[in-house]
Amino acid sequence: MIIFFILILVWASLMLRSGVAEYRYYQSVRTLEPEIWEKLGSPEFLKIPLVFVSPKGSKLLRSVTDKTVCKLARQHRHAGIQFVSYVVLVLATSIVFFKIA
């Protein structure tokens, strides 16, 4: 039972970290690169993640020159990769455990 709580705690902290990194990245583009934000169509709330992963949005975001935005983009990517890796690791370990048990 304690293992379950530890897994959930790690999952929640990685999820929170990923969400915060995503929010900080979006806000940095909005404030530090307003011309790119305008070209993206000034997305609101639920549209923001969709605009950032669209082909047009990706192309525009690759042209970002502000170092802070680039740093936050890297942090956002790393946090997302770590979260997904953790979920995959837990799922794979669980599958192996229940196949053996």
Image: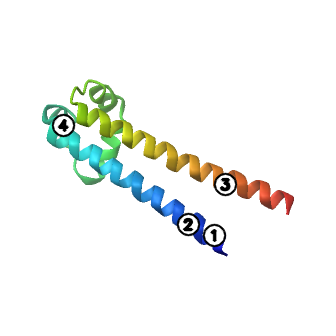
Q: Is residue 100 shown left or right of residue 95?
A: right
| Callout 2 crowding tier (Cα within 10 Å): few <14, some 14–19, many ≥20 | few
Numbered circle sitting on residue 8: 2
Q: What residue sits right under mark 3 in the picture?
A: 91
The disc labelled 3 sits on which kind of residue? Answer: Leu
Q: CA distance from mark 2 to mark 3?
A: 13 Å
Question: Residue 99's image quarter?
Answer: bottom right
Q: CA distance from mark 3 to mark 1?
A: 13 Å
* Residue that label 4 marks: 37
Q: Amino acid at mark 4?
A: Trp
CB-based contact (under 8 Å), mark 1 and mark 4: no
Q: Counting other residues with Cα less than 10 Å from the Cα at mark 3, is it few (<14), some (14-19), or many (20 or more)? A: few
Instruction: Look at the numbered disc 3 and give the secondary structure of its residue.
Output: helix
Say which residue appears at 22% left-offset and 26% top-offset: 65
User: Which of the two marks, 1 or 4, is nearer to us in this view?
Assistant: 1
Q: Which mark is residue 4?
A: 1
Q: In the picture shown, does residue 40 fall above or below 49?
A: above
Q: Are marks 4 and 2 in contact (CB under 8 Å)?
A: no
Most distant residue in the bottom direction: 1
The span from disc 2 to disc 1 (Cα, nearest Å) is: 6 Å
The residue depicted at 48 percent of the width and 63 percent of the height is 12
Where does the image place residue 33, in percent across and percent down from the top left?
17, 34
* Front position in the image: 100 or 58: 100
First-in-chain label (4 vs 2): 2
Residue contact at pointers 4 and 3, CB within 8 angstroms = no
Q: Which mark is first along the chain, 3 or 2?
A: 2
Q: Which is closer to the viewer, label 3 or label 1?
A: 1
Disc number at residue 94? none
Q: Residues within 10 Å of mark 4 (few under 14, many from 20)?
A: many
Q: Amino acid at mark 2?
A: Ile
